[in-house]
Image (cartoon, rainbow, N blue to C red):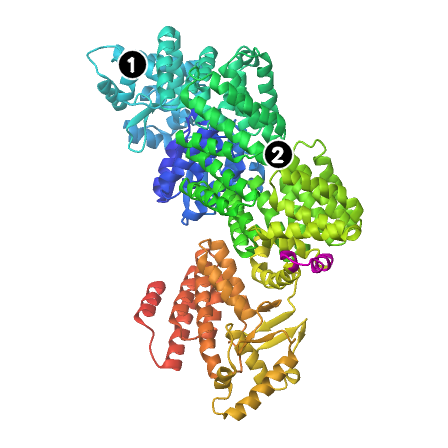
Amino acid sequence: GYGKTTLLTDWARARGIQVGWYSLTEMDLSASRFYQHFVAALQALFPTFGLESMAMVADLNRGEGSVAQFAATVVNELADHVRDDFVFVLDDYHLVDQDEEINLFVSYFVQHTSSACHVVLSSRTLLSLPDLDLMVARSQVSGLDYEELAFRPDEIQSLAHRRFHHELSLDQATALTERAEGWITGLLLSANLRHWLMGDEVRVLRATGIDLYTYFAQQVLDKQAPAVRDFLLKTSLFDEFDAEFCSAIFGEDPGDASMDLEAILDYVRRNNLFVSAVGRYGEQVRYHGLFQDFAREKFIQEQPQEVEQLATRLAASYAADQRWEHAYQLFTRLDDIPSQVAFLDRHGRAMLRAGQMQLLARWLGDLPQLVRFDHPSLIALHGAALVSTGATDYGVSILSQVESTLTPDVHDPLRLQVLVFRSAGLRMLGRYDEALADAENALRLAQQVDGRVDAAELAGAVALSHRLKGLVLLMTGKSDPMPWLYKALTGYQSLKNAHDSAVVSMEIGLAYLTTGNFLQAQPWLEGAADTWTHLHNVAGQANVLNNLGYLHYLRGEYQASAVALIKALQAARRSGYRRLEAYIISGLADLMLNIGFDQEAVVVYQRAKTLAKRVNERFLILYIELAETTLAWQLADQEAAYENLNRAGQLVLNRDSDYEWSLYRLTVGRFYVATGKPDDALEPLHDAVEHLSVGNRSIDLVVAQLYLALALAEADPSAGRTTLAQAVANAAAAEYYPHFVAVATREKGPLTALANSVQFGPARDLPAQIQSFEDESVALRKALRTELFETLDLPDAHTPRLVFCGFGRPEVSVAGNRITSSQWTVTAARDMFFCLLAHPAGLSKEEIGLIFWPDCTIKQLKTRFKNTLYRLRSALPEDVILFDNETYYFNQKLDYTYDVESFLALSERARATNDLHAKTKLLRAALDLYQGPYLMGVDLAWVLGERERLQQVFIDLGLQLASLSLESDQASDALTYCERVLAEDSTLEEAHRLAMRVHAAMGNRNEIANQYARCCAALLDEIGVDPSPQTVSLYERLMS
């Protein structure tokens, strides 16, 4: 009642800034409703924003994802759509301030949103945001309290004059201020100036409570016509309403038949009976909270039976529109626990189907425990909601308690619900046998309760049971999961459930992927990706991209794999999907390990494991422990390898999953082979081969066979050759053969000897394929180094063996040593090398001759070419320049870096990205590489054209970076880039104009004039012209 909202609306209007507004009500205490309306309020201001955030809200409602994911999605999507400053008001925040989850979200949003967003929280109470003290310390917060909002004497005089046409003396105004403590509502409620002079009444009103209610009764309610009075009481149960909604609930006009609802509502509006217009066009109204509380209490006192009947009809209307918060809040306000129980029992399963697990779990958890115990159906609903929202252990425990109370062998629909959701929880906990039993029992029971359960509910339970059975079979490898996953997909499609259809499509693709059927896997994964894109579900896109990255990885398509995994990581981080982020980072570590970034892979696996432990992702923790075991022995750290293996063993002791046990046994065998104990390796490797053969895990099976061959080779060479031949033959027939070769490369020495002893078959080709992969790995490391290291924020301590500098004076270094002029002998040898660098497709002897010795005879050319090439090859390692098919070319597979090549690559990446932060970073990196004109001092014809092209690229990049720096208020940086561009071309008017704008932004009029003078002088001296009209116009505008 201090005028907070009025003050904010006036302030927003006066500022002329864009304002988003969210007026909170009691029902917004539901986190899911708060999130949806939070996004909608921003969406009203920025219509292109919100698709990804709304999709994340739907995920949260289903119990998927986390508040941190949602917050990250909102912040990142808002940054993509908003550049200009705006204000976002959360009005009456005290109504939700007691919700810890909402406070965590708002705190994260305030701290991480872009500097363009300014958040205003209005509240009747002090805020309890978790990091408020920290934000205050950082000077990120300012505010007004009730003392500053209280009306001063001069403001009361002004208000009396403007609103009531009454002149108050300063003494009268001061007395009113002291008596009312500046509380404007206490002064306005009387609406009569004579009351203003009755200090005692104002002081009573200031206390609110029952005395304020007495005022409402005597001065407002009891003065109305009976029909209006009845209308005010009945509609006090409503949240937002219009005449049409009232008619639907009442069934007929209340009270005096001579007054219709439209007329009553119009009267209420005109007489300002404590209503505010709501909705985009003000088509509905809602009451002021103080008056609504009073009127509702009065209605309950006077007409309790009518309250019950009206509440029942109102709740039914809300539930029919899936406005469950409105319905439940109605019974909560009335403190009507029996109606709450009946509502949850009737609509709880529909809320589960609609993905409102979080909301349902909170409501059920808020019920008194004794009430829940009297209703097994509510306990089961609570367990199902807990399983769906991540409280898996507790949810499974509750469901088991309910199941134990049900009569055995009775076909109870409640048992179906318990079995399905308990199966889901058990699968998440890794208790696969129990999960499979529950899923199969649920499918049998579904046939027996058909006709006694809602058709959509039954179809959803059956589809989920099919899916759970398929996933358990996929993980355990006990039988083919595909028929069950296909049945689940059919079920979800019949229900028109796009979300779960996409989930199952992805799982089908993953099932094909894990069994090595890539041709089948790819279309399923791409189809799921299309669905997630259509649904604007960033987390879903991240999941599919991760799987597509894995597919490319197995095919040996490492660049495509890196692209997919990096996009997946960006999407996972964008949506705050920490669990998936851990999987993706682990996948990137696998890729880095395969192509030879061993030391870096150690760091990346550690990061993935830290995340996996944080989200308690048991399978991934096991997988990384096993991967680290392999990496440790390859780095000759047997102690670390043993410790990793021991920790992995602790995770598989219960042997719940044949697949997990197989991976562990395979790694044990590999460890023994690597440590020179082939006899000890035989038993675990035979065990792994046996289990992997049954589970149709062909990708892992051929690796197990490979190591079994190595273990057998010493004691039984014949068996070793046979096993190797079988492993290579199986792998060579599959699309994952490149991955098999990459694994085999780690055992190059012993495998080469064993493969050479095989008389025929694809195993004979394995040594050559290993050598080919080793050669390709050098080029892959070079191609992927920058993007991988930047994405994962890794320090790049590696210095390539060959370093070429084309900007400024041309230089070549080998192993850190610069090649001197004496080593080149003649500059033509150095220039020929850079010419071949500039022509990656290569040049023939004749083409090189035309470039360097156009006037020579054929005989002279032959001599000069032979001598120059000899000096070039003498100065550089012999594998640098290759000759093939009458063409000389630079060997791009070498470990090298070339500043010109890197400059152009950074330029292209900057052009391709829409992320302003990333673009700025890439542009800076590119400009840092430009250390002068291309091949300074070399004036051959082929150099001049390339020099001019690269200079123009530099100028374009410099102007882009200067503009971005100016837009982000980094004026000094912008000026530096303008000066660098002008150092290349002093007549470039665009750079001069940009520099003048920078000086203007810095408020430096003298420098604007000086810059303009420098522009005029350069144009006159260099090309003899005056500045263009565009430059003159800008100068005059800035100076005026």
Q: Is residue 792 above or below residue 110?
A: below
Please give the name of the residue rendered at 37% of the width and 19% of the height, measured from the top-left corner. Answer: 291
Dominant secondary-structure state across the stretch colored magenta: helix
**Residue 251: quadrant of the picture:** top left
Q: Residues within 10 Å of mark 1 (few under 14, many from 20)?
A: some
**Residue 93 in view of the camera:** no
Give x and y (percent) for residue 262.
Answer: 23, 20
Between the residue at mark 1 and the residue at mark 2, the CA separation in whole angstroms equals 58 Å
Task: Using the image as rendered, state which of residue 34 and residue 1035 is in the foreground.
Answer: 34
Q: Quadrant of the C terminus?
A: bottom left
356 vs 616: above or below: above
Left or right of residue 350, residue 711 in this image: right
Q: Considering the numbered disc 1 on the image, is that residue within a helix, a strand or a loop?
A: helix
Closest to the observer: 406 or 168? 406
Binning the other alpha carbons within 10 Å of mark 2 as few (below 14), some (14 to 19) or many (20 upward) gives some
Q: Secondary structure at mark 2?
A: helix
Using the image, tell me which numbered label, if any, was put on residue 250. 1
Q: Amino acid at mark 1?
A: Phe
Residue at (36, 41) in percent of width and height: 45
User: In the rendering, at what x and y percent does residue 741 appear?
Assistant: 63, 55
> Can you tell which mark lies on residue 57?
none
**Nearest to N terminus: mark 1 or mark 2:** 1
Q: Are marks 1 and 2 in contact (CB under 8 Å)?
A: no
Q: Residue at the far left: name it.
A: 258
Label number found at residue 476: 2
What segment carries the magenta color? Answer: 750-764
Residue type at tag 2:
Thr
Q: Looking at the rendering, which quadrant does residue 440 occupy?
A: top right
The residue shown at (39%, 78%) is 1017
- Asked whether residue 483 is drawn in magenta, I would say no
